[in-house]
Image (spheres, rainbow, N blue to C red):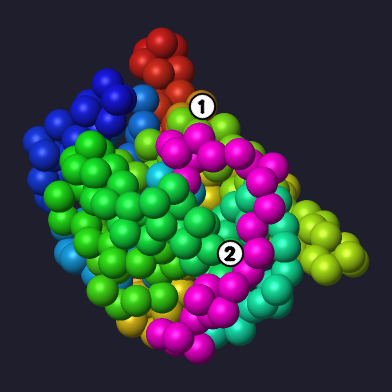
Amino acid sequence: MKKLQQIAATLLLCSATSAFALPFGSQSALVIDESNGQILLEKNADNIVPIASLTKLMTAMVVLDAKQDMEAPISIDEQDVDTIKHSTSRVPVGATLPRKDVLQLALMSSDNRAAASLARTYPGGRDAFEAAVRAKLQALGMTHTTLQEPTGLSPQNTSTASDLVKMASAASNYPDITRITTDSSDRINIKGRPVEYHNTNGFVGKKGWDIMLSKTGYTVEAGRCIIMKIKAAGKNVIMVLLNAGANSTRNRDAMAVRRFVSDEKVAVVKTRRTRKSA
């Protein structure tokens, strides 16, 4: 909580003009050094926009806060089927999985039925889940965030890059979330047969990337979005990229952030060496 307060205070104190700006393709972006809350890069960080499946990080935190039995079975129900975007799912209605596998599917492969079932089976049901989400938003100081459902399919699930940095920092304190979101793939038993699922973030497991938290998102309204916490040049860096027009744009932005953070460290080292020899 102290770290979150530090980040929140720094975000309030730092203006958009105080941060170096890369030519982001994403419409909103914020990159911070988590150790001190320093803004490294920024673009439209306070714009309120749809956030798609980035929502699922909040869903996971609220579910884990309830300390339910993660081995307890959850049966995927007709109520879990997407009626907003009519998206498909590789988790069929009638499949029964332990809650831990449902959480894995919701986070790693961003399955909407899995996320919906976690909210439906929350203690007290969907209404209690939504009340817990509102309480969590308040506790994290996410005052510009509205989450109306657990999947992110609704365009009414909105936030800002500034608020989402707070969510990412909080989510990175949950070992289950960091483990699941940094798994590149997993085999999960679906109706008696193993089915392989992959992480929606292609950078996970890729050489040169040290990722400690990850979540992607996409709807037509939200564009391509991503949250990552990475280690680069000795820094723990949180990046939030929102509303890119294409996967390639979002990926270029993410790679540019990593290069910037790494090159900044190199520049500091070179400067120090020059001064020492002078």
| Quadrant of res 50 | bottom left
Dominant secondary structure of the magenta stretch?
loop
Residue at the spot of label 2: 114
The span from disc 1 to disc 2 (Cα, nearest Å) is: 35 Å
The residue under the point 38% across, 61% down is 126
Visible in this render: residue 85?
Answer: yes
**Residue 74 numbered tag:** none
- Mark 1 or 2, closer to the camera: 2
Density class for disc 1 (Cα within 10 Å; few <14, some 14-19, many ≥20) is: few
User: What kind of residue is marked 1?
Assistant: Gly
| Quadrant of res 47 | bottom left
Q: Secondary structure at mark 1?
A: loop
**Magenta highlight range:** 63-86
The quarter of the rendered structure image containing the C terminus is top left
User: What kind of residue is marked 2?
Assistant: Ala
Residue at the spot of label 1: 234
Visible in this render: residue 232?
Answer: no
Q: Nearer the viewer, residue 50 or 90?
A: 90
Q: Position of residue 229 (x, y in %)?
A: 48, 42
The residue under the point 31% across, 47% down is 132
Give the total of numbered labels: 2
* Looking at the image, residue 79 lies above or below residue 144: below
